[in-house]
Amino acid sequence: MPARASSAETVLLVDDDAAFRDVYRELLRGEGYEVVEAGAAPAAAAQFARSGARLVVLDLMLPPTGRPDDGAALCDRMLAERPDAKVIVASGAGDTALALGLVQRGAYDFLSKPIDPDVLIAVVARAAARLALEDRVTELETSLASRGDDAGLLGRSPAFLEARTLCERAAPTDVPVLITGESGTGKEVFARYLHARSRRAQRPFIAVNCGALNATLLESTLFGHRKGAFTGAIADAPGLFLEANGGTLFLDELGEMDPALQVKLLRALETGDILPVGAARPVTVDVRIISATHRPLEEMMKARAFRDDLYWRVRGIEVALPRLADRVGDLPLLAQHFLNQARALVPRSAPTSISAGAMRRIEAYPWPGNLRELRHEMQRALVMAAGRSEILEEDLSPALRGGFGAAGAAAAAAAAEGGATLEEKIAGLERREIALALDATGGNRSQAAARLGLSRQGLLNKMDRYGLK
């Protein structure tokens, strides 16, 4: 059974059959919804404006003309007036193509008449859940924007929430934190999150990429140097440890650090003293260390490429960030967030939403580049969709439109063999198969269920589980 409405969301029932309205009015009220109704197009337009309803069940065959085109025009008008509304179109067998066209233009779903009561309740419940999610996205974006946070902190998947909870618990302490995860998963965002919630928040946050500099330059950058210590040292330089004094030093890509420099870093972490290049005496500093790497440090220790004593020193608490492919259910929220961010770069006429078809493509793709790739994809799609109100499938890059390709297939295989639990791997693969089946059938749930060997209700249950709309 679908979950009961968690709030008094209003449903507008539009149908010229009074008996239909009587039955479904009581059914929807029993599920916790407020219900208003109309029997003709003009009355429906007035009721829509007056009630503020965001959920609509709309029969296409309406008085005064009884032509499906009039119902379609009413649907378009409602979506233009209230873009966040979820309009569920009810159509006869002969109007399927028209109903599909409405879905492509922004209607939430369509149902063939006669309508199964359980199916209607399930679809309305999903639409209400989508509204709640969109409201939550808006709330989170407002909150995050006021705090200066990033999309790397948005999400509800279990692995992501576990990482964020660890950060929240570690933040008030001075315990070293090691953040692990693939490139593009948001490691620096989490490091800044830790610093912003620490007792050092008013002191500097200094970041350095240990893989971007050779050992000699990195040593001077970290510990500083004295004038004349080497060719080109024309003045004293304090170094990042001293610049971060009282605050946080973020050592990104720690696994790339030269072994010889690892020894000097270890001593600095153990004693709190740094020795600038060319200096005779050490300088004492008070710095919290947050490190990050995409490399397997434990394997590097076995190969003697990374010191085990340094590993245990920086790994006070390890925060493992999940790949985007493992964050089932987070993609709609993140994609919309990145779209909203990208709109600041283009004229105001840019798209404000993502079509159901485009979202299915986004949800089916394995995202080997993680958050960074998704951000760039939404920027590209927004440019391609200039002049329209929403992102369509045709606006997405070829990798998303035409299947995964060789690189995508390799990424999907890696996802199946990666660090996720068996349950998470199975869920991710099942979710992708459902999204692809829905895409192949143009969103037709009955046909998609047949392709997958499921009952229609079984498919609906799985769609609810995986956040597929």
Image: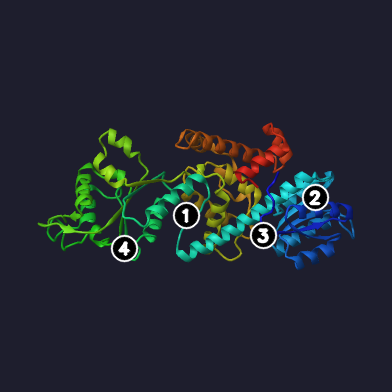
- The residue under label 3 is which amino acid type? Asp
Image disc number at residue 204: 4
Crowd class of label 1 (few under 14; some 14 to 19; many from 20; radius 10 Å): some
- Relative side of 389 to 10, left or right: left
- The residue under label 4 is which amino acid type? Pro
Distance, label 1 to label 2, CA atoms, is 39 Å
Q: Closer to the N terminus: mark 1 or mark 2?
A: 2
Instruction: Tell me if label 3 and label 4 are in contact, CB under 8 Å.
Output: no
**Residue hosting label 3:** 84
- Relative side of 218 to 336, left or right: left
**Residue hosting label 1:** 153
Q: Closer to the N terminus: mark 3 or mark 4?
A: 3
Residue under the image location 76 percent in, 53 percent down = 30
Numbered disc 1: secondary structure:
helix
Q: Closer to the N terminus: mark 1 or mark 3?
A: 3
Comparing labels 1 and 2, the label whose residue is closer to the camera: 1
Crowd class of label 2 (few under 14; some 14 to 19; many from 20; radius 10 Å): many
**Residue hosting label 2:** 90
Numbered disc 2: secondary structure:
strand
Distance, label 4 to label 2, CA atoms, is 59 Å
Q: Closer to the N terminus: mark 4 or mark 1?
A: 1
